Structure formats: C-alpha cells, structure tokens
Image: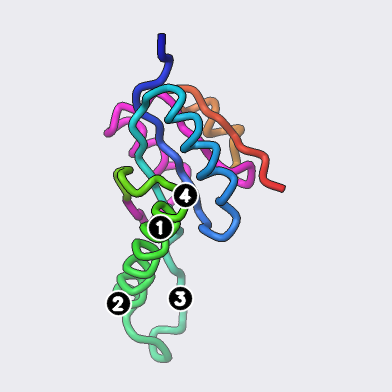
Amino acid sequence: MNLYKHILMAIDTITHSEETMDITREFATSEGARVSLLYTLPHLEAKGMGYLLPSIQEIESRIVETARSRLAAAADEHELGDADESVMLGNCHDNILETALSKNVDLIVVNNDHQQATLISDAPCDILAVRCQ
C-alpha cells in the first residue's frame, strides 16, 4: 500500500536542492506518486530605490521567468521533468501551504534550510525535511 499519492517538493533555491530533488524522485518512484515542484521566492523590497530601478513588477517578472527556466532545467537533470512545476513570489511559508492545500498533496519535501517548525505545525500533511550537506 502506498502512503503518498502526490508529493510537493518546495524549494527556495536551486543551487542547494540537488539532494532534495534526488530524494523526491526516489521517494515518488517507490510510492508511485506524482510530483509537483514549487520554487518560491520572496517579493523584492526597494524602499526609496524606485528612481534608480525599473519597476519592481518588471524586475520580479524577469526573476520569475529565470526561476522557471532554472527549475525546468533542474527538474530535467534530476529526472523530474514530468512533474508539475510552478514558481511563486511571496512568503515562502504561505506559498508552500497554499500550494499543498490547492493541490491536495500528501507529503511536502523541503530542504532543511526552510523554517520547518511553523511549517510542520501548519501543514495539512506530512513533511520530509532533507538534510543537505
């Protein structure tokens, strides 16, 4: 009997997520689960810098497009290319919970650099925190 049918792997960095992606793939394969990938980034803050920069929305839009490309490349590299991929701006904790609820996931996999204490108490499902070396 498989415990998990839908796994959400939530990351806030690509560069330190190789182990998390590999573990998610292995876990999903052994469980026969589908995978959703979430790359979550905080909104930019530019108080008093508006006169120096293009609009914050324009910069965030470029960041999201770059993040989508990087997530897709990393997913392919770690044999997760068939996973549902999304990039969200905002509070990482809230983005993870919102995605977990909307996608009805059974398990959330995160890097150990997320602040798991509140995530564990607020999550609607199990959490696997991967210790990255």
Q: CA distance from mark 1 to mark 3?
A: 25 Å
Find out whether residue 122 is within the magenta segment: no
41 left or right of 13 in image = left
Foreground: 103 or 2? 2
Which residue matches tag 3? 46
Above or below, comparing residue 90 to residue 31 in the picture: below
How far is disc 4 from disc 3 in space, using C-alphas?
Answer: 35 Å
Measure the alpha-carbon separation of dots 2 and 3: 13 Å
The image's mark for residue 92 is: none
- Identify the residue shown where x is 37% and y is 69%: 66
Tell me which colouring the rendered structure shows: rainbow
Q: Which residue is mark 4?
A: 78
Q: Which mark is residue 71?
A: 1
CA gap, disc 1 and disc 4: 10 Å
Neighbours of disc 4 within 10 Å: few (<14), some (14-19), many (20+): some
Image quarter of residue 101: top left
What amino acid type is highlighted by mark number 2? Glu
Gap between marks 1 and 2 measured at Cα: 20 Å
Give the residue drawn at x 45%, y 55%.
Answer: 77
Examine the image and state in which quarter residue 6 appears: top left
Left or right of residue 118, residue 31 in this image = left
Query: In the rendered view, would you say 57 is above or below 120?
Result: below
Question: Looking at numbered disc 1 in the image, what kind of residue is underneath it?
Answer: Leu
- Kindly state the secondary structure of the residue where label 2 is placed: helix
Which sits earlier in the primary sequence, circle 2 or circle 3? 3
Q: Which residues are magenta?
A: 86-113
Q: Does the residue at mark 1 contact the one at mark 3 (Cβ under 8 Å)?
A: no
Total tally of numbered discs in the picture: 4
In front: 35, or 40?
35
In the image, which is nearer the foreground, mark 4 or mark 2?
Answer: 4
For the residues carrying marks 1 and 3, which lies nearer the camera in this image? 1
